[in-house]
Image (cartoon, grey):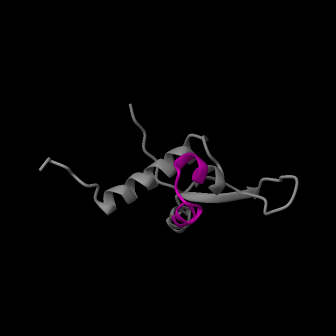
Amino acid sequence: MGDKKGINNNHLKQGNRGLVLRLIATGACNTRIDLAKQTGLTKMSVSNIIGEFIEQKIICEEETEKIEGQGRNPILLSVSEKAPKVIGL
C-alpha cells in the first residue's frame, strides 16, 4: 500500500471558493459563465459559491453585460466595497 492522501471535502470546497474569489478580484473573470469555463466547475457550483459570497457581502452584482442574440444577459460580478480588505507588504 502506498501513502495516498485524499483531499478532504472541506479543503476542496475552500480551494474552489478561493479560486473563484481570486478570478473575480483580479478581473480574470467577471461573470458566472466565465467562472464556470475557467475553473471547470459546474454552473450550479459557481452559482452556489457566488450566492454565498453575495450573502456574506464579499461579492456584488453589477449591471448586466449586453450581448447580441438570444438568451439572458450575463450579470457582472465584482468585489464588494463592504468586503474585508487585507494589505500585504
Residue 43 located within the stretch drawn in magenta: yes
Expressed as whole percent of the image width and height from the top left, the position of residue 25 reads 55, 45
Which segment did they paint magenta?
35-48
Expressed as whole percent of the image width and height from the top left, the position of residue 32 reads 63, 56
Q: Which of 85 and 68 lies nearest the eye of the viewer?
A: 68
Expressed as whole percent of the image width and height from the top left, the position of residue 21 reads 50, 50
Q: Main secondary structure of the magenta part?
A: helix
Q: Residue furthest right?
A: 69
Which residue is depicted at the point 44% across and 50% down? Answer: 18
Q: Which of 15 and 76 lies nearest the eye of the viewer?
A: 15
Expressed as whole percent of the image width and height from the top left, the position of residue 70 reads 85, 61
Residue 36: image quadrant is bottom right
Which residue is depicted at the point 57% across and 46% down? Answer: 38
Q: Which of 67 and 89 lies nearest the eye of the viewer?
A: 67
Q: In this view, does 71 lie to the left or right of 43?
A: right
Q: Is residue 64 left or right of residue 46?
A: right
Residue 23 located within the stretch drawn in magenta: no
Q: Classify 38 as above or below 56.
A: above
Residue 6: image quadrant is bottom left
Q: Which residue lies furthest to the left in this view?
A: 1
Q: In this view, does 17 lie to the left or right of 11?
A: right
Which residue is depicted at the point 40% across and 35% down? Answer: 88
Q: Which residue lies furthest to the top in this view?
A: 89
Instruction: State the count of labels.
Output: 0
Which residue is depicted at the point 36% across and 56% down? Answer: 12
Quarter that holds the C terminus:
top left
